[in-house]
């Protein structure tokens, strides 16, 4: 480190060869950024890259389109499936479910009430009498159970 009356230099000495090297480096970077004629090999690479990008974009768009179209068609098929299941088969499945519960728990009031309602919806008034009689026996103060039992017995 040396000081010259107000000038402070730190580090290396100035060497004329280094300045020339820096000038050469700047000239080479300027030459690289300047436009140069495109040769045939570079043009081929550019065309190949462009064709590749267009192909990739087209296949991506086609894939996305087919994904959405198949999703929409499967939604239409799913909406049609529940319509194919009949009301009678649903009621029969509910009836079997309530009967299964009543085999394990014969005094289950929810299952008895559900079974009676399902059988009344199926117009099986004779089958609804047994669960309704059990409900009336378990709940003698409920007038609605007595009224349903009377309707089921009166319209055999």
Image: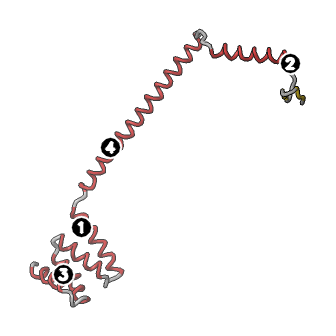
Label 1 Cα crowd, 10 Å radius (few <14 / some 14-19 / many 20+): some
Figure disc tally: 4
**Could you tell me which secondary element the residue under label 2 belongs to?**
loop
Mark 3 and mark 1 residues within 8 Å of each other at the beta carbon: no
- Discs 2/4, front: 2
Tag 3 residue? 129
Using residue 43 as the reference point, say whether residue 23 is left or right of it: right
Q: Which is nearer the N-term, disc 2 or disc 3?
A: 2
Q: CA distance from mark 2 to mark 3?
A: 115 Å
- In this rendering, the answer to whether 140 lies above or below 112 is below
The residues tagged by marks 2 and 4 sit, at their Cα atoms, a distance apart of 76 Å
> Does the residue at mark 2 contact the one at mark 4 (Cβ under 8 Å)?
no
Q: Secondary structure at mark 4?
A: helix
Examine the rendered structure and indicate whether residue 76 appears above or below residue 136: above
Sooner in the amino-acid sequence: mark 3 or mark 4? 4
Using the numbered discs, state the Cα–Cα distance from disc 1 to disc 4 in whole angstroms: 31 Å
Q: Residue 32: where, in percent of width, then height?
A: 66, 15
Q: Neighbour class for label 4 at 10 Å: few (<14), some, many (≥20)?
A: few
Specify the farthest residue to the left.
154
Gap in Å between the C-alphas at discs 2 and 1? 101 Å
Residues at marks 2 and 1 touching, judged by CB atoms closer than 8 Å: no
Viewer-side residue, 111 vs 50 = 50
Quadrant in which the C terminus is drawn: bottom left
For disc 4, the marked residue is: 72
> Mark 1 = which residue?
91
Q: Quadrant of residue 35?
A: top right
Rendered image: mark on residue 15? 2
Dot 2 or dot 4, earlier in sequence: 2
């Amino acid at each position: 480190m040396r000081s010259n009356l107000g000038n402070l230099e730190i580090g290396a000495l100035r060497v004329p060869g280094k300045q020339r090297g820096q000038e050469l480096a700047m000239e080479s970077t300027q030459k690289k950024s300047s436009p140069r004629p495109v040769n045939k090999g570079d043009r081929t690479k550019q065309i190949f890259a462009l064709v590749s990008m267009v192909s990739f974009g087209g296949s991506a768009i086609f894939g996305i389109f087919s994904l959405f179209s198949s999703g929409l068609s499967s939604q239409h098929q799913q909406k049609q499936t529940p319509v194919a299941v009949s009301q009678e088969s649903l009621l029969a499945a509910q009836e079997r479910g309530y009967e299964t519960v009543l085999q394990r728990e014969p005094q289950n009031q929810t299952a008895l009430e559900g079974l009676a309602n399902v059988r009344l919806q199926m117009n099986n008034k004779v089958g609804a009498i047994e669960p309704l009689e059990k409900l009336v026996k378990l709940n003698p103060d409920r007038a609605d159970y007595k009224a349903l039992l009377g309707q089921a017995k009166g319209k055999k």
